[in-house]
Amino acid sequence: MITGNKGEWSEIYTLFKLLGDKQLFLGDKDVERLEGLVYPIIKILRSENNGDFEYSIQDEIILISGDKQVLRVSIKEFKEKALFLLNTIKENIEGTFSIPEIEKFMQSINCFSLKASSSAKTDITIVVHDQRTNQQPTLGFSIKSQLGSPSTLLNAGKTTNFIFKINGRLENEEVARINSLTVKRGKRLLTDLRGRVQAIYANDCDLEFVKLQRKIFSNNLRLIDSRLPEILSQILLDFYSTSFVKLTDLVNLTSNRNPLDFDIENNHKFYEYKIKRFLMDVALGMMPSQVWSGKYDATGGYLIVKENGDILCYHIYNRNEFEDYLLNNTKLDTASSSRHEFGKIYEENGVQYFNLNLQIRFVK
């Protein structure tokens, strides 16, 4: 029996829904359809453990090839199964679950797993007809579903810790007090990171960015833009010292302050442009723990499964819309301070330091 969570079942829903729609709709920064921009779908490619399969659209029939026989399934059936699957996903609150009716249909169309083969770099690969160029590009996508919990864009780790020097001096008793500040969330006591940052400032001290904890991530950022570590450190400080969480608000705050003293006399959007490049590279392959070459992998974009079941496309093929979507639909998030070892004042060679962690999550 196949079981999966909402995000995993969303991959099968995406396959059914796109084959039923026969076209791919492009999205804007507000996760709404871009009017007049549609890609007719030629076929969808999917890798299973037992081989590669093609789902080709022929009028109102889907031809499924890749095994010894070619299957013919009506588009109407894909539409019906997509609607049933969407409603079932919504009915399940959390955890993993099975859907026997869908599993039976999956097996009948040579679809034996929720996720594409682990050897594949994409969740789904689609051949479309580009009416502007009269070409048929093959586009790879990662599927992001709004039916479940918001997914992360940049995962937290010790690799994403930023090291700040405390300018000023905190007495040992005050260090112990600040390091013990917690906040109650429901029945849990969590590290009060904002409270600790504010307490440092309240002691007439400030935080000065020194470096990232891991050199690989630091060099990855400088490869994208030489000033990116400094820009992200300022955004990170603002996140932990203000009420702003959305990246658009944090970038605007940094832009208004202009801490890097860019020449903004002619309204150049230095900070927005550099953060968009960073988000795009993260979306298309850059990982903090691995050396980034600047080359995108086969996943050239995202498919967003909306709460109402609509599916929108964002791809490097339409870079501007993709960048706008990433900036307008992400926020900074707080990871586990104990697991990733940040949020405590510590001392080395007579200098006091405080680490903050960068994690970026999609907005629901």
Image (spheres, rainbow, N blue to C red):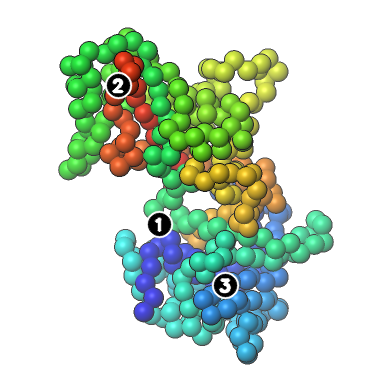
Could you tell me residue 361's position as x and y percent?
44, 44
Mark 2 → mark 1, Cα distance in angstroms: 42 Å
Toward the front, the furthest residue is 349
Whichever of callouts 3 and 1 sits on the residue coming sooner in the sequence is 3
Of the residues tagged 2 and 1, which is closer to the observer?
Answer: 2
The disc placed on residue 47 is 3
Q: Residue at x 63, y 26 (%)?
A: 270
Q: Is residue 328 left or right of residue 125?
A: left
The residue to which callout 2 is attached is 347
Q: Residue at x 67, y 45 (%)?
A: 319
Q: Residue at x 40, y 57 (%)?
A: 148
Toward the right, the furthest residue is 134
Toward the bottom, the furthest residue is 69
Q: Does residue 8 show up? A: yes
Could you tell me residue 210's position as x and y percent?
45, 22
Mark 3 → mark 1, Cα distance in angstroms: 24 Å
At label 2, the amino acid type is Glu
Whichever of callouts 2 and 1 sits on the residue coming sooner in the sequence is 1
Q: Residue at x 70, y 18 (%)?
A: 266
Q: Does residue 274 show up? A: no
Asked which quadrant contains residue 178, the reply is: top left
Could you tell me residue 189's position as x and y percent?
19, 38
Q: Residues within 10 Å of mark 2 (few under 14, many from 20)?
A: few
Secondary structure of residue under mark 1 = loop
At label 3, the amino acid type is Ser
Question: Mark 3–mark 1 contact, CB under 8 Å?
Answer: no
At label 1, the amino acid type is Gly
The residue to which callout 1 is attached is 148
